[in-house]
Amino acid sequence: MHFKYTALALIVASIIFSCNQTTPPKPARDFLADNLDTATSPGQDFFQYANGGWINKTPIPPDESGWGVGNLVNEDIYARLRKINAKAVEENAAHGTVSQKVSDFWQSGMDTAAIEKQGLSALKENLDLVSNIHSMQDILRVTAAFHKKGIGGLFGEYVAQDDKNSNIMTYQLSQGGIGMPNRDYYFKTDEKSVAVRNAYQHYLFQSFRQLGNDSVAASKDARAIFQLETFLAKASRKLADLRDPYKNYNKMSIAALQKISPNINWTSYLQEEGIHGLDSTIVGQPEFYSALNTELKAAPVDVWKNYLRFHLLLSSAPYLDSTTYNNYFAYRKSLSGVFQPRPRWKRVLDAEENAVGEALGQLFVKEYFNEKAKQRYSDMVEAMREAYKERIRKLSWMSDSTKAKAIDKLTKMTKKVGYPDKWKDFSAMQIEKAPYVINVEHANEWWHQYNFSKLGKPVDRTEWDMTPQTYNAYYNPSNNEIVLPAGQFAVPGKKDEELDDAFVYGYAAASTIGHEMTHGFDDQGRQYDAQGNLKGWWLPSDSVQFTARAKKIIQQFNEFSPVDTMHINGDATQGENIADLGGVLIGADAFKKTEAYKKGEKIGGLTPMQRFFLGYAYGWMYQERKEVLAAQLMTDVHAPAKERTNAPVVNVPDFYDAFGIKPGDKMYRPDSLRVNIW
């Protein structure tokens, strides 16, 4: 609302204001101070102290498996993206434009009446492909067609940089073919794994009933598919074993691949994929392909046909009618503990993010991440880089030779902040007024063609693998780069200029920038050189020292039992845990050089260094249901939020000084047990 004042009115108004202003205004409350659980000592449980005030008064919504800062950020992002979609619908833009694709995708996903009426009819073309299978070669032909549409089955395939020659894009194969998140769900006997396994088997039965089988046939087919997948799961590597880049790098000729899997005509399969003249591939887990080769011949063709029907339904369920989706959701609930589905509009936005997320990002950053914010975090990256270099120079356990190469790698590490300098062209993507699931398939086909067309072409090192609005970040070892989307720096309800440096150095510099930098030197990333190639550049004695020090962080995390009797897998999570610790250490070093630290002014009754650590903890302000915690412990290389908060800080001397942690406190860790890597 705007008011127009005369000069006299302005003078009178100012006099009235000054006369009535008998007491100074109350200072705005500090959000970090408001989140504290002051009934808990930071020396007893720092996570609960830092975030417990918020957690205690904030229940998890019934349609979510967990709730925290990332969800709050995403709520803001969802609202903005919904407005972008509404505007695109109003524009009625010309065919082929980004706005037209956004509008038609959105409307096809939100048209529940049409989706309910279509039922499974939108899958007719794919179901007909399966019905016409008569041989092993037909199975592979349909699998190729499904892979192009984003429908999973048999194995995993993708195009990516060669780990040992990062300038080359290669065709790569990985284990896959199972319907549950990973192999362990087929074998573990703990209560939660058994519950997921039972829910999955019931979902198999319901799916075959929906596909037209009577209850006897549906039960028989469900058992056969579960048995087939169990065989594939047994041949799959465990989570921790997938972290060794050398063991999962097996480059071979197509002729050699043919020898370990003679029942798969790879030349024919690759032609179905549109790949011609390929002479070699990188196979992540060769033993899986030997097992798949056996099972392709052992299992009857009709079993494989049912397998493909089920995986078609599994991949398509989120985009189909309510019966299909609800059957799928009932199974997924056993993994997440969610009581009810998320609102449709959010689910459609998630699908749209996968389809044309970067196109949405062009519109998003115009109002969400200005140049001033981009410069702030770009400068922060450089401050962190310098702090890391200093820390490397001071290491007592690393030789000068390896130090020089580590600093060279760090110097050459590329930073990508906020959003891409050039955007992808989506003009060829076929999105129109069609069934929702068909638009999703068309988007998947575009992405398949986009990625597979990279074979034989120079690597585009400017490309982003996340959209600007993503609340996440990553380190890419093949490009030796850190990628920091705009969404990752957002704070719920706050403009960037409202955030003090002490908080930002904990929230952004430590938990994100330093974390991603340290990934270049964790148990996996350290095996890639400055050019992004999988190549030994450490002196053997330095590698021995690193492994011994990393063993301490494995042991530290093995101690944690976040849910029931289940423990964190310290081996599988060590890369993320090393990155967390490195981020906090480097962040604290960099923060100490800022004016905010040197001034020592308190905000919300908190010292600058206290705000730094609380800012780090704010980045892990989450609570999760037991079901999703259990699933995370089995399938994720990230530890839960509480442990990602408490575990790193007990290894950092500045934390003890900031909060007066003393022997006898639960958060106190003796020097002999503290992890000291970077």
Image (cartoon, rainbow, N blue to C red):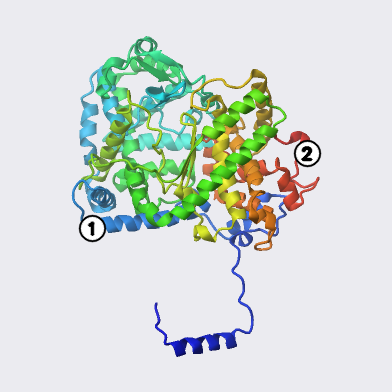
The residue to which callout 1 is attached is 91
Q: Amino acid at mark 1?
A: Glu
Q: Residue at x 31, y 39 (%)?
A: 316
Q: Secondary structure at mark 2?
A: loop
Residue 678 visible, this angle: no
Q: Quadrant of the N terminus?
A: bottom left
Question: Label 2 neighbourhood size at 10 Å, few (<14), some (14-19), many (20+)?
Answer: few
Numbered mark located on residue 670 in the image: 2
Q: Is residue 63 above or below residue 218?
A: below
Q: Check disc 1: other Cα within 10 Å, few if <14, some if 14-19, many if 20+.
A: few
Q: State if disc 2 and disc 1 touch (CB < 8 Å).
A: no
Q: Is residue 346 left or right of residue 118?
A: right
Percent coordinates x, y for residue 577 in the rendering: 60, 36
Residue 580: which quarter of the image? Answer: top right
Between residue 658 and residue 601, name the one nearer to us.
601
Residue sitting farthest toward the left: 95
Q: Is residue 469 left or right of residue 55?
A: left
| Image: 669 above or below 623 | above
Q: CA distance from mark 1 to mark 2?
A: 64 Å
Residue type at numbered disc 2: Pro
